[in-house]
Image: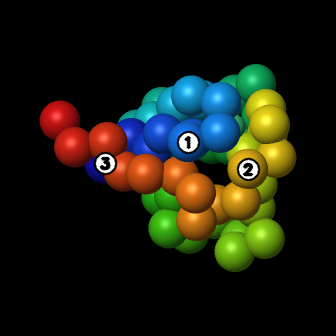
Amino acid sequence: MSKWYCLGCGFMYNEAVGDEKYGIPPNKKFKDFDPAWVCPRCGTPKEKFTEVVS
Ligand SMILES: [Zn+2]
C-alpha cells in the first residue's frame, strides 16, 4: 500500500485507508483509479500526483 501526494494542493491519498469523504473505499490502489480521475480538492490531473516513499 502506498500514499500519493497531490503536487497542486498537498492532498494526500492513503491507499490503505481510502478516502471516505470522497467515496473511495479502503485498499483501493491509486493506479486503479480511472485515468481521467482528478484531485477532488483542486482538480489536478492524476499524473501530477507523486508516490510518497516512506
Ligand atoms: Zn490537489
Give amino acid for label 1. Answer: Leu
Q: Earlier in the sequence, mark 1 or mark 2?
A: 1
Q: Could you give the CA–CA distance between mark 1 and mark 3, rounded to whole angstroms? A: 20 Å
* Drawn side of residue 32 relative to residue 17, left or right: right
What type is the residue that disc 3 sits on? Answer: Met
Q: Describe the element under mark 2 as helix, strand or loop.
A: loop
Q: Nearer the viewer, mark 1 or mark 3?
A: 1
Disc 1 target residue: 7
Q: Nearer the viewer, residue 28 or 3?
A: 3
Distance Cα–Cα, label 1 vs label 2: 8 Å
Residues under numbered marks 1 and 3 in contact, where contact means CB atoms less than 8 Å apart: no
Q: Quadrant of residue 18?
A: top right
Residue placed at 57% from the left, 41% from the top?
6
Q: Position of residue 15 (x, y in %)?
A: 45, 43
Establish whether ligand 1 lies closer than 8 Å to the Cβ of label 1.
yes
The CA span between labels 2 and 3 is 22 Å
Assess disc 2: are there few (<14), some (14-19) or many (≥20) residues with their C-alpha within 10 Å of its C-alpha: some
- Residue 33 screen position, x and y as percent: 64, 65
Q: Which amino acid does the dot numbered 2 rest on?
A: Thr
Asked if the residues shown at circle 1 and circle 2 are in contact, with their CB atoms under 8 angstroms apart, the answer is yes
Residue at figure coordinates x 56%, y 28% from the top left? 10
Residue 36 sits in which quadrant?
A: bottom right
For image coordinates 71% across by 59% down, the residue present is 45
Q: Label 2 belongs to which residue? A: 44
Q: Residue 44, image x and y in percent?
A: 73, 50
Which residue is tagged 3?
Answer: 1
Q: Is mark 2 within 8 Å of ligand 1?
A: yes
Which picture quadrant has residue 54?
top left
Specify few, some or many for label 1: CA neighbours under 10 Å numbering under 14, 14-19, or 20 or more: some
